[in-house]
Image (tube, rainbow, N blue to C red):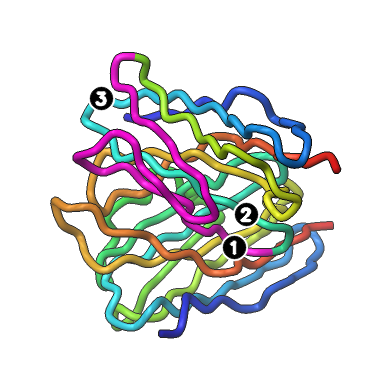
């Protein structure tokens, strides 16, 4: 069984500042980890994923995340926030290649001008 | 390549009424998922199909929810009768196949259900 905890339901940063969204997971098997972004009234878009190999993964729109097994974490970062980054972000985990995803509750990212 | 299609996009019904949602996955995708996303929460898997067979329906409230995937392509999710707590966005996703390697799930735009 898997579970995901996202710390902070709302995160506010200034435009140009570092974005850090936190995700901790629990999994009884080696996990596959994901970050999705959801804009208002739209579906989920995959930002990045960790499956195997390199623990630092880069995604779209300048985002990256690092898989830390010892800390059971997969935090999402972006060096410089842009107004267009304002959205809901979800961390997700699965233990199997085609199993359903278990999502966290989401973090609403607010960008201050 | 066309994405995952869902209809309707919005639906408003009275409690105790019935409702059905339709999903057309990406062509060639053998695995299809239905998720329920309640406002303020992350999506929750309701049911997973591999072709036209059910792989996982452990979180589907079977007393009122049903789903089918005839011919292993399109899928329909039905709620009968609906309750107020069923108000949510229903997301459909598809992926290539059941395998030991990771298969990316592609999500549709969702159907927003409001139960009054």
Q: Residue at x 23, y 53 (%)?
A: B102
Image coords of residue A62 (percent x, y): 52, 49
What is the chain letter for disc 1?
A: A
- The CA span between labels 1 and 2 is 6 Å
Residue that carries the numbered disc 2 in the rendered image: A38
Going from N to C along the chain, the mark reached first, 2 or 3, is 3
Eye-nearest disc, 2 or 3: 2
Q: Are marks 1 and 2 on the same chain?
A: yes
| Image spot of residue A84 (x, y percent) | 71, 55
Residue range (magenta): A42-70
Quarter of the image with the C terminus of chain A is top right
Residue at image coords 55%, 61%: B91
Dot 1 or dot 3: first in sequence order is 3
Indicate yes or no whether the magenta region holds residue A52. yes
Query: Residue at 26% of width from left, 72% of height from top?
Result: B30
Label 1, on which residue?
A: A43
The image quadrant where one finds the N terminus of chain A is top left
Q: CA distance from mark 2 to mark 3?
A: 28 Å
Image location (x, y in percent) of residue B2: 45, 84
């Amino acid at each position: 069984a898997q579970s995901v905890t996202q710390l902070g339901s709302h995160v506010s940063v200034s435009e140009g500042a570092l974005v850090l969204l936190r995700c901790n997971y629990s999994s009884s098997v080696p996990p596959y980890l994901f970050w999705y972004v959801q804009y208002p009234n739209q579906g989920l878009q995959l930002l990045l994923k960790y499956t195997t190999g390199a623990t630092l993964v880069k995604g779209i729109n300048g985002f990256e995340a690092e898989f830390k097994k010892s800390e059971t974490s997969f935090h999402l970062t972006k060096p410089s926030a842009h107004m267009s980054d304002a959205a809901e972000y979800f961390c997700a985990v699965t233990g199997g290649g085609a199993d359903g995803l278990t999502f966290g509750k989401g973090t609403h990212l607010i960008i201050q001008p | 390549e066309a994405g995952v299609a869902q209809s309707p996009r919005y639906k408003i019904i009275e409690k105790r009424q019935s409702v059905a949602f339709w999903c057309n996955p990406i062509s060639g995708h053998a695995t299809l998922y239905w998720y329920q996303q309640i406002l303020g929460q992350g999506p929750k898997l309701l049911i997973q199909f591999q072709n036209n067979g059910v792989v996982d329906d452990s979180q589907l409230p079977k007393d009122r929810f049903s789903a089918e995937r005839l011919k292993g392509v399109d899928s329909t999710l039905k709620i009968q009768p609906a309750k107020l707590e069923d108000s949510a966005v229903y997301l459909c996703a598809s992926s290539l196949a059941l395998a030991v390697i990771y298969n990316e799930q592609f999500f549709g735009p969702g159907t927003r259900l409001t139960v009054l």
